[in-house]
Image: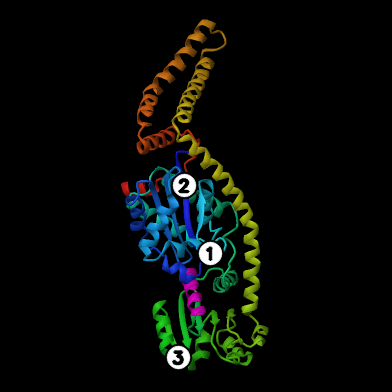
């Protein structure tokens, strides 16, 4: 390998939020460009900066002082010192860096195991590097492979199938009970952070209407406005219950605010259509007796915690399958890196030509039948393999000339391998979809 792939990072495991916010990189594209422009040893770069991690991936000249270079630029950009940054840092090199990027893309390195948001953040980071021209042969290939790995993990394992937050688990339970959510009305009692998260997931699930009922009406108005819902005074709670299919309650009340005797009237009023209650509050807002009523489904926070913990255990099992996929893809990436040297690509190119010649020769001999003479057979063999070698003669000469040019050489080798599919990769169905759409 003529270059080093190195990843420098800090995340929620290695650094508290006060450190992460000090070294956060608000504009990853600008910083990626700075890494390349301020050091000739850094040839490619990508920067990922989220609330839980800040990572700099660089492709550097082999055996250069990349660590000192990157940390110096990073600390200077943040207006801090490298010494303060260093104790919180992890550094992955070469295939360990490749494996780390694959694990990040698949959500295996996230605080919530298997969460999908990090993939979108990684795609944004890559887009910034493309726009700042700091993503070249290695970073381009690595990130496209990371997106492929994330898709395989998401498709071939169940790592993203189970809810792992209280609010998300609550909405998932509602979906199991009601199925289609588009015609359902939701009532949020209380307007704190949990209600806000629940509202986010309810909107994503497609509920028809959200009403926010809170003791402080101005706060109900604020939250309702944010989610295009309707505020309601707390005194109208029973009236609101009659219109709701899903109720999520998270007030600070010290005793129950909804009891079975209240719900009997409400259920009669709504003709016993099913209702789903999620009581996130501690102490609980909803009297457990409510659960004894027909067509009323009540879950409290302990019920949801069990669901979340059960789902986290399931995700851990699925993570083992994901690690196997990643190990396989790291091996394939290693093979591709080795192929960026000239000789392996020439060997593969000539081998591909011989395979084509042998295949077409076989078809021709089959058509000519068994009576063909040995002289004719030998003449056809010489013809087929000669054509193959002559076709690939000029491309091989071209690659030999350009191989001496560091960056252009790798680029042409990579293009050649892709053009003749020397790595035997199957293009996904959605490959170049964006380009096709733009053309249409």
Viewer-nearest residue: 195 or 240? 195
Alpha-carbon distance for marks 3 and 1?
A: 40 Å
Q: Main secondary structure of the magenta part?
A: helix
In x, y percent, where is residue 169? 58, 71
Can you identify the residue that label 1 sits on? 14
- Is there a contact, CB below 8 Å, between mark 3 and mark 1? no
Lower position in the chain sequence, tag 3 or tag 1:
1
Q: Tags 1 and 2 in contact by the CB under 8 Å rule?
A: no
SS of the residue at dot 1?
Answer: loop
Residue hosting label 3: 216
As drawn, 16 above or below 282: above
Q: Which is more N-terminal, label 2 or label 3?
A: 2
* Whole-number angstrom distance, CA of label 1 to CA of label 2: 21 Å
Q: Badge 2, how many Cα within 10 Å: few under 14, some, many 20+?
A: many
Q: Is residue 124 visible?
A: no
Residue 159 image offset from top left, x and y in percent: 59, 58
Q: Nearer the viewer, mark 3 or mark 2?
A: 2
Q: Determine the secondary structure under disc 2.
A: strand
**Badge 1: residue crowd in 10 Å (few <14, some 14–19, many ≥20):** some
Mark 3, secondary structure of its residue: loop
- Residue under the point 44% across and 30% down: 342
* Labels 3 & 2 near each other (Cβ < 8 A): no
Residue drawn at point x = 58 percent, y = 61 percent: 161
Tell me where the magenta segment starts and ends, as one range. 193-206
Task: Please report whichever mark, 1 or 2, sits nearer to the chain's N-terminal start.
Answer: 2
Residue linked to disc 2: 5
The answer, for residue 396, to whether it is visible in the render is yes
């Amino acid at each position: 390998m003529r270059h080093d792939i190195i990843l420098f990072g800090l995340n929620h495991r290695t650094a508290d939020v006060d450190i992460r916010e000090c070294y956060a990189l608000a504009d990853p594209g600008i910083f990626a460009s700075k890494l390349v422009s301020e050091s000739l040893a850094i040839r490619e770069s990508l920067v990922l900066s989220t609330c839980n991690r800040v990572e700099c991936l660089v492709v550097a000249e082999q055996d250069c002082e990349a660590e000192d270079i990157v940390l110096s630029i990073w600390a200077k950009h943040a207006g801090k010192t490298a010494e303060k940054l260093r104790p919180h840092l992890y550094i992955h090199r070469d295939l360990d860096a490749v494996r780390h990027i694959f694990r990040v893309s698949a959500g295996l390195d996230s605080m919530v195991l298997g969460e999908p948001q990090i993939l979108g953040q990684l795609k944004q980071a890559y887009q910034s590097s493309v726009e700042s021209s700091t993503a070249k042969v290695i970073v381009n290939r690595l990130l496209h492979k990371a997106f492929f790995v994330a898709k395989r993990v998401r498709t071939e394992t169940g790592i993203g199938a189970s809810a792992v937050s209280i609010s998300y688990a609550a909405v998932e339970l509602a979906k199991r009970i009601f199925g289609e959510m588009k015609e359902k009305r939701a009532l949020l009692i209380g307007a704190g952070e949990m209600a806000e998260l629940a509202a986010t997931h309810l909107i994503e699930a497609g509920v028809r209407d959200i009403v926010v009922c809170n003791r402080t009406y101005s706060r109900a108005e604020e939250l309702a406005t944010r989610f295009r819902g309707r505020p309601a005074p707390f005194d109208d709670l029973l009236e609101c219950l009659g219109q709701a299919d899903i109720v999520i309650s998270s007030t600070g009340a010290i005793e129950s605010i909804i009891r079975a005797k209240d719900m009997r009237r409400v259920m009669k009023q709504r003709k016993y259509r099913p209702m789903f209650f999620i009581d996130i509050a501690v102490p609980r807002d909803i009297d457990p007796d409510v659960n004894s009523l027909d067509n009323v489904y009540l879950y409290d926070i302990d019920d949801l915690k069990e669901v979340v913990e059960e789902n986290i255990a399931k995700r851990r099992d699925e993570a083992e399958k994901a690690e196997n996929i990643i190990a396989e893809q790291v091996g394939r990436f290693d093979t591709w890196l080795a192929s960026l040297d000239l000789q392996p690509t020439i060997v593969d190119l000539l081998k591909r030509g011989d395979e084509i010649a042998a295949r077409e020769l076989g078809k021709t001999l089959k058509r000519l039948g068994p009576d063909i003479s040995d002289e004719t057979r030998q003449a056809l063999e010489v013809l087929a393999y000669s054509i193959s070698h002559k076709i690939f003669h000029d491309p091989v000469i071209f690659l030999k000339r350009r191989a001496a040019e560091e960056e252009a050489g790798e680029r042409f080798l990579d293009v050649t391998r892709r053009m003749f599919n020397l790595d035997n990769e199957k293009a996904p169905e959605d490959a170049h979809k964006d380009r096709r759409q733009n053309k249409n």
